[in-house]
Image: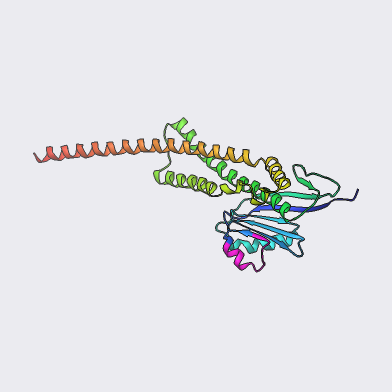
């Protein structure tokens, strides 16, 4: 049997978002395909491939480390916020003309042929997986910080966080949730699988392999837990503010009585 060929895939979360429109206009290479949210390039006689998503992920195929690092440095100028986390996944596509159906493993997929559609499906699913890694890291941080406040309530019976800092924390949680909601489309099936049964099966099996849908449901569940905690913290602070206002009113009434007694 002839030795199979390989295409190495690397997906990296570089930023929170990319300006896709500006990048497409200034990159200087006509894309193979594009939309308002993504761009797919074939480079150097179709031996290298590049898939860029507006949620901050870049997927490289057959890139050398030098070429990959050069492009990462270039695309950072189109990023809204650089992600300072090492979030990446490696995968490979094995092309074996002797097989008749796709074989999917944890770290590679074997296909009987390769074209731009197959590449896009594989690269898209890896991009989705890395994006979920990023949101999972954000929610882990939120849950850890909320757990600290819950433990403080348990041991001290009160919260030391100020109202200003709580509002900042609420803003951070809502920002993460809104970002996830804005990027819900990343879980949608791409248009090219609708009329192609083979691509549809490949996409479905890759989603299952990367646990895309279960991970998103778990992410949404954990965000709901954080929101429930926020409501609890807000109620505690409102009680604290009400108690403070009551004491202020009592002190003012006492001062008014004392002044009245002194002048009469």
Q: Please state which of residues 6 and 153 is positioned toward the viewer in this rendering.
A: 6
Query: Residue at (66%, 60%) from the top-left corner?
Result: 33
Q: Residue furthest left?
A: 264
- The x and y percentages for residue 40 are 67, 59
- The x and y percentages for residue 113 are 80, 51
37 vs 99: above or below = below
Name the side, left or right, on which 228 lies relative to 95: left
- Residue 5 colored in magenta in the image: no
Give the mark count: 0
- The x and y percentages for residue 224 are 51, 37
- Residue 30 colored in magenta in the image: yes
The stretch of residues the image draws in magenta is 21-33
Query: Residue at (88%, 50%) from the top-left corner?
Result: 3
* Quadrant into which the C terminus falls: top left
Colouring scheme, one of rainbow, by chain, secondary structure, one colour: rainbow
Q: Please state which of residues 34 and 176 is positioned toward the viewer in this rendering.
A: 34
Name the side, left or right, on which 109 lies relative to 190: right
- The x and y percentages for residue 167 are 42, 45
Name the side, left or right, on which 176 lies relative to 67: left
Q: State which quadrant residue 207 falls in.
A: top right
Q: Please state which of residues 65 and 251 is positioned toward the viewer in this rendering.
A: 65
Q: Residue furthest right?
A: 1
């Amino acid at each position: 049997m002839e030795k199979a060929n390989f295409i190495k895939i690397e997906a990296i979360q570089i930023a929170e978002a990319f300006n896709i429109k500006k990048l497409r206009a200034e990159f200087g290479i006509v894309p193979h395909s594009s939309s308002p949210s993504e761009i797919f390039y074939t480079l150097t006689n179709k031996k290298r491939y590049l898939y860029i998503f507006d949620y901050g992920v870049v997927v490289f195929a057959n890139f050398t480390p030098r070429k990959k690092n050069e492009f990462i440095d270039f695309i950072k100028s189109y990023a809204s916020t650089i992600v300072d986390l090492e979030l990446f996944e490696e995968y490979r596509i094995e092309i074996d003309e002797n097989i008749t159906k796709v074989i999917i493993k944890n770290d590679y997929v074997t296909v009987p042929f390769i074209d731009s559609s197959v590449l896009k499906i594989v690269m898209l699913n890896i991009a989705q997986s890395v994006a979920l890694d990023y949101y999972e890291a954000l929610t882990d941080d939120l849950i850890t910080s909320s757990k600290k406040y819950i433990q403080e309530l348990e041991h001290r019976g009160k919260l030391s966080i100020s109202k200003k800092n709580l509002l900042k924390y609420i803003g951070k949680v809502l920002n993460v949730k809104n970002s996830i909601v804005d990027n819900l489309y990343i879980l949608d099936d791409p248009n090219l699988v609708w009329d192609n049964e083979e691509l549809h099966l490949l996409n479905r099996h890759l989603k299952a392999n990367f646990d895309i849908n279960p991970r998103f449901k778990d992410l949404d569940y954990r965000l709901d837990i954080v929101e429930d905690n926020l409501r609890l913290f807000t109620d505690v602070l409102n009680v604290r503010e009400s108690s403070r206002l009551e004491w202020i009113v009592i002190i003012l009434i006492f001062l008014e009585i004392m002044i009245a007694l002194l002048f009469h």
